[in-house]
Every structure is written in C-alpha cells, then in structure tokens.
Image: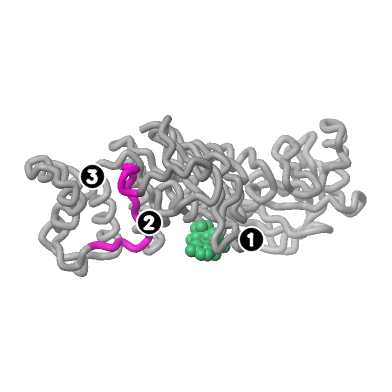
Amino acid sequence: MPTITLRNAEKSYGGTAVKAVRDLNLEIGDGEFMCLLGPSGCGKTTTLRMISGLEHLSSGEISVGDRVVDCVGTGTFVTAEKRGMGLVFQSYALWPHMTIERNTDFGLRLRKVPKAERQERVEKVMKTLGIDKYRDRYPSQLSGGQQQRVALARMLAVNPEVLLLDEPLSNLDARLRLEMRAELKRIHEEFKTTIVFVTHDQWEAMTLATSIAVMSEGELQQVGSPNDIYDRPANRFVAEFVGSPPINIIEVEDRNASALAGLAQSYFARTYPQIDGIGSVGMRPEALGFARDVRALPKGAINGEAVVTGVLPTGGSWIIELLTQQTKLFLTTHLPPQVNDGEKGFFYAKPEALHVFDAQGKRHIG
Ligand code: ATP
C-alpha cells in the first residue's frame, strides 16, 4: 500500500462556520499503525472520514501514492468504494438476521468473490479472531467484544489495504478492551495492513501505535512515535494530554515566586540564553523524587521545599501528592514509599528530565 498523504487538508461544515480540520499535513506510511489522538471534537473522525472518502475536503488534497483521491483545486474525487479502504466504527453494524459466518462473508459476497476463495478467507479470519466457534450464532447471541471481533473479521476478510477504525473499542469493558488491543496488535503484525485508528484514549494510542498524530481544535500538534510524543512533546498541549497522572506544570510567570522557578531559571539560563522566553516548566511524575533532608538530594538536581499531602496506592505503584509553595505536584513510584502525610522535605528532578515551554506553551524549548 502506498503512502497516504494529506496536504493542507481542511474541512469546514456549514460554509465556514465550523472549521473541523485546519491545514492538516500528514503522511501515513505503508504498514503503519497510526493513531489519531485528541480530545472530543478535535477533528479526528472528520480526518478519518476525509481519508475514507465519506467526506469531501473543503480545501487541500489527499493522495494515495501517486494517485490523487481528493483535490479541491482540480475537482478530483475518488469515492469511498473505490479507495480500497475498510472502515469500522464504534457501533458494529452487524446484520442481525445473518449468522456470524454469513456476516463475516458479507463483504466478499458483495464483491462477488468466487465461493472457494470466500470460504478460505472467511475460515482464516474467523480462526484468527477466535470467532469460528460462534459461526452458527446470530449477533444478538454474542457479547459486545465478540460482536466487535466479527465486525473486524468482516472487514479483514475483504483484505483491505488500509483499515480505518473509529474508536472501535469504546463500547467494551476494561478487560475486553485490553484483550482486543492485544488482538489488534497481532492482526496488524499478521496482516501487515496499514491501520488508522481514532481514539481519545492516550493509553490505547501509546500501546497500539507505531505513530501517533496528536490533534487539538482541528490542528495537528505533533506526529511521532509513542516515545517521541511522551518524551519529546512538541508543546504544552501534547505534554499535558499524554501521561497519567499528568505532567506537573509550574508556571514561571513570576521569576521570584518559588524556589523551583529560581533554580530552573538558573539552570536554563546557563543552557538556554533565551531565558526570557520561558513560560512554564513540566516534570513527569516518574521523574520526580522526594528527600526528607537537603543532604540526601542528588547532586545537580533541581529542587524545592515540599510537604507530603497524600500517599495513594494504585496497586503495584504509588502516587505521592506534594504541596510546594507554588503548586501541587504528583510523583509516582514503584517502590513502597517511605513517607507519610504531613512530612516535610524536598522534591527534586534531574535538570535533563525537565520540559521547558515558551510563554504561550506552543513550543518545547528544552
Ligand atoms: P469525538 O472524539 O467526540 O468523536 P472528534 O475529534 O472525532 O470528536 P469530529 O467528529 O471530527 O471530532 O468533529 C470536529 C468538529 O466538527 C466538532 O466541533 C464537531 O462538532 C464538528 N462537526 C463534525 N461533524 C459535523 C457536521 N456534520 N456538521 C457540523 N459540524 C460537524
């Protein structure tokens, strides 16, 4: 499958009243598992629908390899059926009066695939997805997770070059979701299909994607591997959207406001001459430590006074809530914490672990 390229793609609804997607430039490579990630209303589904051909662009261009499939300038538009992409939505839309086997076979029949080939493909996907044992049942006799498998099987049977999935796991309970994630990963490895997957769930994106495109208010914020997105967020929005507990942010509005601001500034003044541009400093919860005594602080660490205000076990790890002069901080640890509520001490972090953002939060500057 060639690369799918969106160039300056835009979508407005109702004239220009709602700009759902703005100036989107994105490449989805062959065999990629690309997650479109962002909060509700940021334009993920619209992007997926534009790629699929269910939605016309308002401006810009989409191409698949050398073939332009939508271009407002030239009026080119290839319909959804002719794009060779499979679409699975949150609702499974299985045929209630057809057995699981017939449902799985549905797309192949529609495409008039010869019977022997159909049988072979249906057998293969039903086995892969573990639904062959339900072949004679009807959708209403299956659980939500099993129905979702059938919806996926039906799509995979027609062997689409691209699989477009819009929050396909959101109707499932936590355990099934986890199982289906593992299954999707396996399907991706086995079928080598290019997958574009819409989700607002950062864990889902982090665990599944080879590449994540983070969107906010119709605009692409960053594209990168899950590690890139987490460790090298392009701006404050990405840093705050990804991570749980969320990244700790300290505003550096008032230069003398806190010990941390002062320390961070002296560190960054040495490293970055444009110190005046700093608006906030972020620290991931796992990058923070707590020491009771100033002598126990690691050499060179950024630190500040803090009081422990909560120790929350989360099963296998702990969240420690700290209160500094300026703000609340969350620290995570996998070792049983040796601190109690009300204890005073110092939080610390290695300077390299800090994320520094400009005054508008639009740029990660260190
Ligand atoms: P969610 O996660 O809630 O599904 P999303 O990120 O997928 O959200 P979209 O469904 O793409 O977001 O919607 C983007 C914006 O476009 C929203 O403000 C939405 O209200 C608007 N929108 C979507 N479809 C239409 C439509 N048919 N007519 C008018 N506005 C629309």
Against 6, residue 280 (above or below) is below
- Decide: marks 1, 2 in contact (CB < 8 A)? no
Q: Secondary structure at mark 1?
A: strand
For this rendering, which residue is in front, 262 or 151? 151
| Element on which disc 2 rests | loop
What is the distance, in whole Å, between disc 1 and disc 3 at their CAs?
52 Å
Image vertical order of residue 271 relative to residue 84, above or below: above
Q: Position of residue 2 (x, y in %)?
A: 39, 31
- Pick whichever of labels 2 and 3 is earlier in the sequence: 3
Q: Which residue is mark 2?
A: 168
First in sequence: mark 1 vs mark 3: 3
Q: Is 238 placed left or right of 30 in the picture?
A: right
The residue pinned by badge 1 equals 311
CB contact under 8 Å: marks 2 and 3: no
Q: Is mark 2 within 8 Å of ligand 1?
A: no
> Which residue is drawn at the image coordinates 54% and 61% (left, top)?
13
Q: Nearer the viewer, residue 1 or 194?
A: 1
Q: Amino acid at mark 2?
A: Pro
Callout 1: CB less than 8 Å from ligand 1: no
Label whose residue precedes the other's in the sequence (1 or 2): 2
Q: CA distance from mark 1 to mark 2?
A: 36 Å
**View extreme (bottom): residue:** 140
At horizontal 12% and vertical 44% (from top left) the residue drawn is: 118
User: At label 1, which amino acid type do we have?
Assistant: Val
Residue furthest out toward the left: 116
Which of discs 1 and 3 lies nearer the camera? The answer is: 3
Residue 84 counted in the magenta span: yes
Examine the rendering and report whether any part of residue 40 can be seen: no
Circle 1 packing at 10 Å, graded few (<14), some (14-19), many (20+), is some
